[in-house]
Amino acid sequence: METAVIFLGGGNSCRMNYPKAFLKIDNSMILENNLNTYSSVDIKKKVIILNQNLFQNKWLKNIRTLQKKATLIQNNFPDLGRSYSIYLGLKQIEDCNSCFIQNVDNPEISEELLIVMKKSISENSYVVPVHKNKAGHPILISKTIIEYLIKKENFNWILKDELKKFHKKLVPIKDIDVTLNINTPDDFEKYIMNKKRFGFETLF
C-alpha cells in the first residue's frame, strides 16, 4: 500500500513577509528536512504545492533543491484557497492508498509518529495526532477520502468540515511539536530559540 504526502504552500505568506516554504535553519530549508523525514519512512511520492510567485529567478536555487526531492506544483489561483491546493496535490497522488497532508509551516515531523499513523489508517478513515486534546499535524487520509475530495465540484469547502463525514482516528502523542505553526517572524524566532535552548521531545 503506497502512501504519499502533500505539502501545502500555496498561500502568500503575508504575515511572515518571506516564503514559509523556504525558511532555513543552519542553511537547510525546514521543508527540505521534512522531505528527508518522509523519505526515511518509505514515503516515495512527495508533492509540494507552491504559490506561482515563487517560481521566479529570485527563488530558483530553493526551487531546484526541492525539485530533487519532490514534485513541485504551481498554484496559479491562490485566491481559490487551501481547498484548491489540496485538490492540486491529490490529483498527483490519486493512485495511492493514503496520503499525509502537511503544511509547510509545521517545522517538526517525527519519524515515529508517521510510522504509527501509517499503521493506524483504514478504509473510510483519517488519522490525526493529538497533544493534550489539541489536534496537530500532519493528518493522514485514506483512499476513500482522496477520491471523495477529488470529485467535489467546487473549492468552497473546508477540509476539517469534510472530514467529519468520515471515521476519525486519534493518535495521542506527548510531543508538543505536532501543534507547532510558524506564521510570523516572531513565531519563527521563538521556535529557533526554543530549539536551541531545549530541543524537542519526540517520545510517545
Image (cartoon, helix red, strand yellow):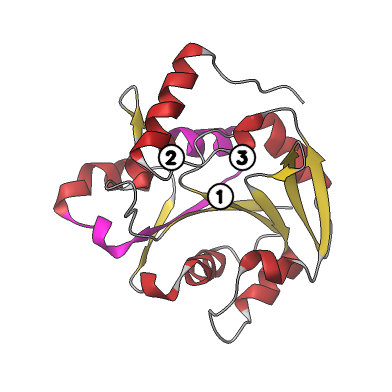
The reply to whether the C-beta atoms of the residues labelled 2 and 3 are less than 8 Å apart is no
Seen as rendered, the residue at the extreme front is 186
Front label number (2 vs 3): 3
Whether the magenta-drawn stretch holds residue 41 is answered as yes
Amino acid at dot 3: Thr
Position above or below: 43 against 163: above
Q: Cα distance, mark 2 to mark 3?
A: 16 Å
- Kindly state the secondary structure of the residue where label 3 is placed: helix
| Residue at the image point whose x is 67% and y is 64% from the top | 160
Q: Which residue is mark 2?
A: 31
The boundaries of the magenta stretch are: 33-56
Q: Which residue is mark 1?
A: 102
Q: Which mark is residue 179?
A: 3
- Kindly state the secondary structure of the residue where label 2 is placed: helix
| Residue at the image point whose x is 63% and y is 81% from the top | 151
Tell me if residue 32 can be seen.
yes
Seen as rendered, the residue at the extreme top is 197
Tell me if residue 110 can be seen.
no
Counting from the top left corner in percent of width and height, residue 77 is at 36, 74
Amino acid at dot 1: Gln
Counting from the top left corner in percent of width and height, residue 82 is at 49, 66
Mark 2 or mark 3: which comes first in sequence?
2
Front label number (3 vs 1): 3
| Residue at the image point whose x is 48% and y is 20% from the top | 195
Whether the magenta-drawn stretch holds residue 28 is answered as no
Counting from the top left corner in percent of width and height, residue 167 is at 84, 62
